[in-house]
Amino acid sequence: MHHHYTAISEFRLLNRRTLRECPNRSPYLQVNVSLSSNLSDEEYVNVTVNGALLPSEHDWIAMISPSHSNVENCLLNEILYVQTGDLSSLPLLCHYPVKAMYMSSDPDYLSCKKQECKKYDKGKCVVRTCGGTLTFHVINIRTDIEFVLFGGGFGTPCVLNRSGPISFANPKKPLYGHISSVDSTGSSMRLTWVSGDKEPQQVQYKDGKTKLSEVTTFSQDNMCNLPSPAKDFGWHDPGFIHSAVMTELKPSSTFWYRYGRDYISSGSVYITPDSGGECGVPYETYFPMPTPAKDKPWYSIDQGSIHFTVISTEHNWSPNSEQVPANKWSLSRISEYGYLRAHATKKEIKLEFVNSNTKKVGDTFRIIKK
């Protein structure tokens, strides 16, 4: 058997096969969700499984979106994950779930502490079933969701039961706003947010000023040319990205703003695997920077007394390349007194003061997350 650099093995020879319903399913099995109404913009949802005759450590719950997603088994997806460098055990479905969790996360499930009697004979219980509850953190992703109970683990999943579709109360609501600099003047800021509505919206700020948003989005066809999680089974409709520039601001001052209809006071961060395929389209669309053009992510900008210079190492940065002359003035400002070099990980930021002539580190300190 031949392996090349991505370690693709005989999985290449396997075709996608239809996922069958699990054999010998319990007739009492149910998947229930603790909701009295449609989903809010952010909440914790309890998903309860009842009626399991033989609870297994391989049983797991997936949150899928949209609810009509293809949950057949696709072994070839393992190849696409290997190409991203993600070698962890992941659900091999044709459409990747938003979230997934093993039922064993509730210790009462395998130990069958939550028993129910489903059948009596002469006053005695002859059929007992087990149950368990998992909690999922759900945010408004606009498309309806569904919770699916699988058997067989992540490698050979089969469907045991489903909850039925669940919708968000406000799928078009403007959410997840963030601000970024436009230029070095300090008098303008760009506000970007996401909505399910393609019609222009507005930002209101600073004593009654308003700006209308420009609207954009991207599709599967805009993603990488080769099959990858970003283009294939990991795709999810991004909605519509709104962007508006607030002008006539005073540097070092405080001002209030709101966008769309409502202002959301908090957000959430999710750490996910690499989307694969070097797809920069979502990043460029969600986070516009003061770059000269699309796919030219280099620029210089002043923020107070600090001058930032951004260079892309994924593009040509030889002396005669397009981006080096554009930043020549900025690079020439690095004096003999040195510059600050930063290394960031998920756990810490390391800052080093470097002498620009000798390249020696004169001082260093760390900011550590606890």
Image (cartoon, rainbow, N blue to C red):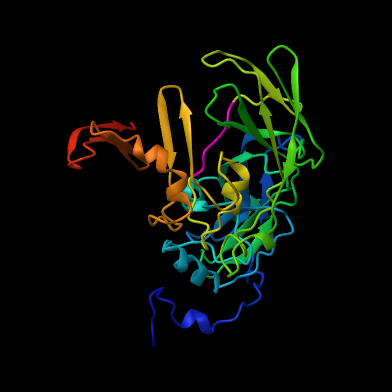
Q: Nearer the viewer, residue 266 or 261?
A: 261
* Residue 196: percent from left, percent from top: 76, 42
Give the total number of marks visible in the rendering: 0
Quarter residue 35 falls in: top right
Q: Residue furthest bottom?
A: 1
> Residue 361 vs residue 51: left or right?
left
* Residue 295: percent from left, percent from top: 56, 53
Quarter residue 139 falls in: top right
> Residue 301 vs residue 249: left or right?
left
Quadrant of the snapshot with the C terminus? top left
Q: Nearer the viewer, residue 107 or 232?
A: 232
| Residue lying at 35% horizontally and 34% vertically, measured from the top left | 333
* First to last magenta residue range: 266-270
The answer to whether residue 272 is magenta is no
Instruction: Tell me if I can see residue 331 in this picture.
Output: yes
Name above or below for residue 216 compared with residue 9.
Answer: above
Q: Nearer the viewer, residue 149 or 299?
A: 299
> Residue 16 vs residue 368: left or right?
right
The answer to whether residue 267 is magenta is yes
Quadrant of the snapshot with the N terminus? bottom left
* Residue 360: percent from left, percent from top: 17, 40
| Residue lying at 58% horizontally and 70% vertically, measured from the top left | 226
Name above or below for residue 324 compared with residue 340.
Answer: below
| Residue lying at 56% horizontally and 62% vertically, measured from the top left | 229
Quarter residue 37 falls in: top right
| Residue lying at 43% horizontally and 47% vertically, measured from the top left | 311
